[in-house]
Amino acid sequence: MNMRTGKAWVDVGNALIADEFFQVAMAGLEQLYVKLMQRSYSEDHLIMQKTAVEKDLFQVLSYQAESAKVLRLLATAYLDWNDREYYDKALSAIILANKVKNYADALQWYYYSLKFYGFDQIDLDLAKLQRNMASCYLHLKQLDKAKEAMMEAERQDPTNVFTQFYMFKIAILESNSDRALQAITNLESLLTTEEPEDNDLLPNRGSHTMLLNLAAQFALENGQAIAAAKALEYLAQHSQDPQQVLTALKCLFRLVLPQVYQIPDSENKKKEMGRLLTCLNTALLKLGQAFDGESSTLDSRANEAHWFRKIGDFSQDPCETLLLLYEFEVKSKMKDPSLDSFLESVWELPHLESKTFETIALLALETPAYYPSIALKALKKALLLHKKNEPVDVLKYSKCMHILINLSVPDGTSSVELCPMEEVWGYFEDVLSLISHTEGYPEIEILWLMTKSWNIGILMFNRSKYVSAEKWCGLALRFLHHLGSLKGNYETQVRRERAKVVGFMGERGF
């Protein structure tokens, strides 16, 4: 009753009153324990009664630990009972008691606990004890003693993630890059194959990325760039938080790029470039995930994409192009006022391919953005690049030209004055020239061009622009000439309709 009442006072925050009840409960348990030892019981019955008292004793002391720090008393009690089972319990109580950062005091308890273990004994609790001692030594700046403790911990429990974590920290403090890389590699391997084991010194011990994050920070704080870069690389590979991945990658590039620039052309440099390309691909993947559903962060998306695109400039790799397209998409959809200045730099880039410009055109026409002038300029640049290829890829060229013409003169256009018709005429002439000198131009596209030019001619005719009408209808006949199997289906009809147009114009003196 006193124990439950005391716990209730702890829960409402009155530690003083709670402790009075706990002291009464402790006095009662001590009296009960004395009576148990004085009475004559069978061995089995005595063990059962002692176990019940110990359970209540531990619970009272645990409750007291919430408002008074008495776990060391519990550890002492266990040690006085002089049994290996109680030594283990004492060790657990000691570890729990020394989360209070009194490292020198904690070490005294750990030394006292070591006497219960044999020199050649393999024990996971002993490994945990050695790791905790190493942690205290590190806080006390006693690196040699920390290293000695961790060598023993590694002998006892080499596959524990915290063993490798502390081995990494010690290697960093010794400026031993090779050992640090080996330890972080071992740590990453263990994190990806099993759950981290229990450790009272580190919170959130179920998180794989927590240790990698701590390792990277520790290496950076101690000026060990090579080890920090490897930890950041692993963090970017395993973290499920897109923003954490992007932050890790940005830090990684800042560390690695200066080193890559200084490497002479060699297989090693190619390897490092491949490593960075993989990281850029990861960044591209995470850019879309980091801001899903957050319209207020569109500007952040563009800034992140721009940062990684600048990194991509050093290698002129395909990932840089994807980042450029991503940045354009974000800026266009958010109607960013800096879009024009951004595009001015894009138009001048020397290494972009026709596909990139075609994609820009398509993105410029997607809702909610609609920039037909940007699409037109991008398509023109794509066509120029297509024409420079030998031989010209007529399938890609025809598709690009189709979009350009349809964008310049949409189907059903009623106001020809808004369309740059002389420029559009030049597009048709370019296609005719290509068809005349290149085989394989899609016949269905030739038919579409013939129909398009004919419809423009009829539109001009209905607008009483008879000279332009005759010109465009004549252009349709020129496309008709290049039709193959479809020519017979359309030739009679097109020539008959053109004759009507010419006759009508003749009657009016044109």
Image (cartoon, rainbow, N blue to C red):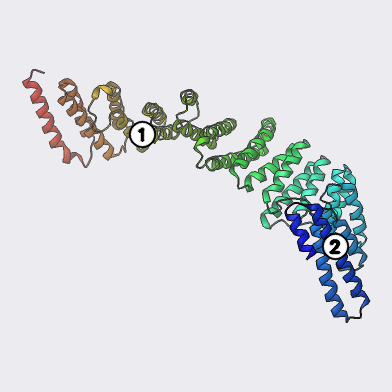
- Label annotation for residue 400: 1
Asked if residue 264 can be seen in this view, the reply is: yes
Q: Residue at x 60, y 41 (%)?
A: 243
Q: Which mark is residue 17?
A: none
Image quadrant of residue 427? top left
Q: Which residue is mark 2?
A: 24
**Mark 2 or mark 1, whichever is nearer to me:** 2
Residue density around tag 2, few if under 14, some if 14–19, many if 20 or more, within 10 Å: some
Q: Secondary structure at mark 2?
A: helix
Q: Is residue 458 left or right of residue 335?
A: left
Front position in the image: 298 or 322 = 298
Q: Nearer the viewer, residue 296 or 182?
A: 296
Residue 63 location, x and y as percent? Answer: 79, 58
Q: Residues within 10 Å of mark 1 (few under 14, many from 20)?
A: many
Mark 2 vs 1, N-terminal side: 2
Relative side of 230 to 455, left or right: right
Image quadrant in which you'd find residue 357: top left
